[in-house]
Image (spheres, rainbow, N blue to C red):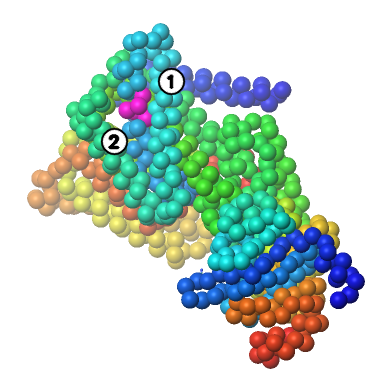
């Protein structure tokens, strides 16, 4: 273990999974998975179809409650917390099967997420008081900024269901960013994108980490994307963790190669 | 500062407008029409408040008459019990009782809203409808509120307080509009669109749904409080399931989620069918002709929407299909009048009122499933524009 990694090991973990397990009937979708993500990591979670990657995200974000094991955000145990509470604490996600608010405009999608930390009360909104108007304006301005970051400012007013696939994926990221998370979870952000788009996305994700200081955990099937972007990777297969380490280690790990049945990794 | 001046000015304008309607109606309109003016305002309130629950937040609640009834009975009972032993005049007392009705109904809204956290779609619809029936049947058997023979609300308003009904309607519209203009309101729409994504973005889905139920039923309850003192008499049959269905029809017809749509549909559906009551004799020939023409019209409109794609042709084709079916009605009714069995049979207007609601809904679902306005609003500068 190099010095840099040792230092990292000492720093505070943002997210820790400790023997996280979830069972659907007889199926262990995720079984005894343990890993921890340090602040500022660009962390990859990979594995063949049905490996349990999305289920891991659902465990972390409170969609499912772990059957056993612990999910910790900093020092806080997340088991059993409601998804909106977890988001408030600072974990935001995108969805593999895009879940935008489809009849709302791109901007409105981001504003919904951006209103998470607003201070003006419900009553002030109902009576349209200056505080509510002002804060809505600020949230909007921030949302437009984020649309710019994701290169979407030109479609701010387009209904999100009318957007092409690649833009919907980027809008999901903008929306998640609007909640101002500490940890950003991206579920197959490059799926359905062409090589140029995915190249562009890679730069954007790196920028999200470097400029905005977010810690990123991402699931992706595009190996080029993961290997170029992520500094640490965990590999799942049939719900179990089969390998973890840097891209080079993962690429040469026989178990990983076997899991992917000889696919080029 | 200029904000408060503008705010006060717009409130003054709204109140002034209400008194203007009041004055105009009392000076110029027949009692029968004045009644429609009042009912229109109450139905606007009911439709707009159901739209908040149903259209904006996406909770398929269909028993809105229950909250209307709870408000009416609470206000009525309070007046019967306390009015004599207190110093307030009727002009102050009635608005106060509307608040009592609103608060009581919102408690009922809370009770019904809670299952909505677990139930979705049709299941919630059944629960809300069932709640409405329970409320109605309980009052039917409750001695303190006169059971099935009803309860007199003494004193009632000496002349219809038209302004008050309209002030309530405008307030309900303003509250919904305000909500949709702020970031808070978008959270309600988000819950309608996708609950899982909403909660993942930090929206408190539970609180949002309950807030919609409480607020929506509060307005229905206030409308009920008004009704109690307007009619001076309450009886459970005033709040049957068809009242709920009429309110629901207004929301769907206007376009679920659109406040302006609810208002327009509420005005149309609360007034137009009433005029039918006056028509004593509607010939069967005319009815059959209308039925055939409606079918022909629907087929024509659907044909245009599916097969005609050039905008200029469409602009002619749509009105053409509608005017065509009206002409067809007239011609057919003359032709059918030659058939003796049809020519001699007739029915009266009040009987086909509900038929008209049903037909309107069926036609709408076929021709324009998104409702008159869809999700759109008229004349609002809103968040939807990207410039500040
Ligand atoms: N709610 C559920 N009920 C039952 N089984 C489930 C549920 N959710 C996931 N599973 C099962 O858990 C396993 C893991 O699914 P998951 O979606 O996590 O895979 P994944 O790694 O994200 O795959 P992909 O790459 O295809 O997205 C699958 O076998 C899936 O069928
Ligand atoms: Mg997945």
Instruction: Tell which residue pokes out farthest to the top in this image.
Output: B87
Is B291 left or right of B95, judged from the image as shown?
Answer: left
The question of residue B73 being in magenta is answered with: yes
Q: Residues within 10 Å of mark 1 (few under 14, many from 20)?
A: some
Distance (Cα) linking label 2 and label 1: 21 Å
- The chain holding disc 1 is B
- The magenta region covers B71-75
Q: Position of residue A252 (x, y in %)?
A: 77, 87
Residue at image position (31%, 58%) is B296
Closest to the observer, B329 or A158 = A158
Is B298 left or right of A154, judged from the image as shown?
Answer: left
Residue of label 2: B239
Q: Position of residue B40 (x, y in %)?
A: 38, 31
* Majority secondary structure in the magenta region: helix
Q: Position of residue B306 (x, y in %)?
A: 44, 64
Q: Secondary structure at mark 2?
A: helix
Residue of label 1: B95
The question of residue A86 being in magenta is answered with: no
Is residue B228 shown to the viewer in this render? yes
Is B173 left or right of B282, judged from the image as shown?
Answer: right
Q: Vertically, is B209 above or below B27?
A: below
Residue at image position (20%, 41%) is B351
Image quadrant containing the N terminus of chain B: top right
Is B125 left or right of A150, judged from the image as shown?
Answer: left
- The chain holding disc 2 is B
Residue at image position (60%, 64%) is A59
Residue at image position (71%, 50%) is A143
């Amino acid at each position: 273990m190099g010095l840099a990694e040792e230092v990292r090991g000492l720093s505070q973990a943002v997210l820790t999974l400790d023997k996280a397990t979830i069972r659907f009937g007889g199926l262990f979708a995720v079984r005894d998975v343990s890993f921890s993500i340090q602040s500022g990591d660009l962390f990859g979670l990979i594995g063949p179809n049905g490996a349990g990657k999305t289920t891991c995200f659902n465990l972390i974000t409170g969609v499912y409650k772990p059957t056993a094991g612990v999910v910790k955000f900093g020092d806080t145990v997340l088991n059993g917390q409601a998804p909106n509470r977890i988001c408030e604490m600072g974990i935001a996600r995108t969805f593999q099967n895009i879940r935008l608010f489809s009849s709302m405009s791109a901007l409105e999608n981001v504003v919904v997420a951006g209103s998470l930390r607003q201070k003006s009360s419900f009553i002030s909104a109902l009576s349209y008081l200056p505080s509510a108007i002002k804060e809505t304006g600020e949230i909007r301005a921030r949302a437009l900024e984020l649309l710019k970051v994701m290169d979407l400012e030109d479609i701010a007013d387009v209904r999100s269901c009318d957007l092409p696939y690649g833009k919907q994926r980027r809008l999901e990221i903008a929306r998640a960013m609007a909640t101002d998370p500490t940890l950003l979870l991206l579920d197959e952000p490059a799926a359905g994108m062409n090589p140029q788009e995915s190249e562009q996305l890679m730069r954007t994700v790196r920028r999200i980490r470097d400029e905005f200081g977010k810690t990123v955990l991402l699931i992706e099937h595009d190996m080029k994307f993961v290997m170029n972007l992520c500094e640490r990777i965990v590999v799942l297969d049939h719900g179990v963790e089969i390998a973890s380490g840097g891209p080079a280690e993962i690429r040469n790990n026989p178990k990983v190669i076997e899991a992917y049945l000889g696919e080029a990794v | 500062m200029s904000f408060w001046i503008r705010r006060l000015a717009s409130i003054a304008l709204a109140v002034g407008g209400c008194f203007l309607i009041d004055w105009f109606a009392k000076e110029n309109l027949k009692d029968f029409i004045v009644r429609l003016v009042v009912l229109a305002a109450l139905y606007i309130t009911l439709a707009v408040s159901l739209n908040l629950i149903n259209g904006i937040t996406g909770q398929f609640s269909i028993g809105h008459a229950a909250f209307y009834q709870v408000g009416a009975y609470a206000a009525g009972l309070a007046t019967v019990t306390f009015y004599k032993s207190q110093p307030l005049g009727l002009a102050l007392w009635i608005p106060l009782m509307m608040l009592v009705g609103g608060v009581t109904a919102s408690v009922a809204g809370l009770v019904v809203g809670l299952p909505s956290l677990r139930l979705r779609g049709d299941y919630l619809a059944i629960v809300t409808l069932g709640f409405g029936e329970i409320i109605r049947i309980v009052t039917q058997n409750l001695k303190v509120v006169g059971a099935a023979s009803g309860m007199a609300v003494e004193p009632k308003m000496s002349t219809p307080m038209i302004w008050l009904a309209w002030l309530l309607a405008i307030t309900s519209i303003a509250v919904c509009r305000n909500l949709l203009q702020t970031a808070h309101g978008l959270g309600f729409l988000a819950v309608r669109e996708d609950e899982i994504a909403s909660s993942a973005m930090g929206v408190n889905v539970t609180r949002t749904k309950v807030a919609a139920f409480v607020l929506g039923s509060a307005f229905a309850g206030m409308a009920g409080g008004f009704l109690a003192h307007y009619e001076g008499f309450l009886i459970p049959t005033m709040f049957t399931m068809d009242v709920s269905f009429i309110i629901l029809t207004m929301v769907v017809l206007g376009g679920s989620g659109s406040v302006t749509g609810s208002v327009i549909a509420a005005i149309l559906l609360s007034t137009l069918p009433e005029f039918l009551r006056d028509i004593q004799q509607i010939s069967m020939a005319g009815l059959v002709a209308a039925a055939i023409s409606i079918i022909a019209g629907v087929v024509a409109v659907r044909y245009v929407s599916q097969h005609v794609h050039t905008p200029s042709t469409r602009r002619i084709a749509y009105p053409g299909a509608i005017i065509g079916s009206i002409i067809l009605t007239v011609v057919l009714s003359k032709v059918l009048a030659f058939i003796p069995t049809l020519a001699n049979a007739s029915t009266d207007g009040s009987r086909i009122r509900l038929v008209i609601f049903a037909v309107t809904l069926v036609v709408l679902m076929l021709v324009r499933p998104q409702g008159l306005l869809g999700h759109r609003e008229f004349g609002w500068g809103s968040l939807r524009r990207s410039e500040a």
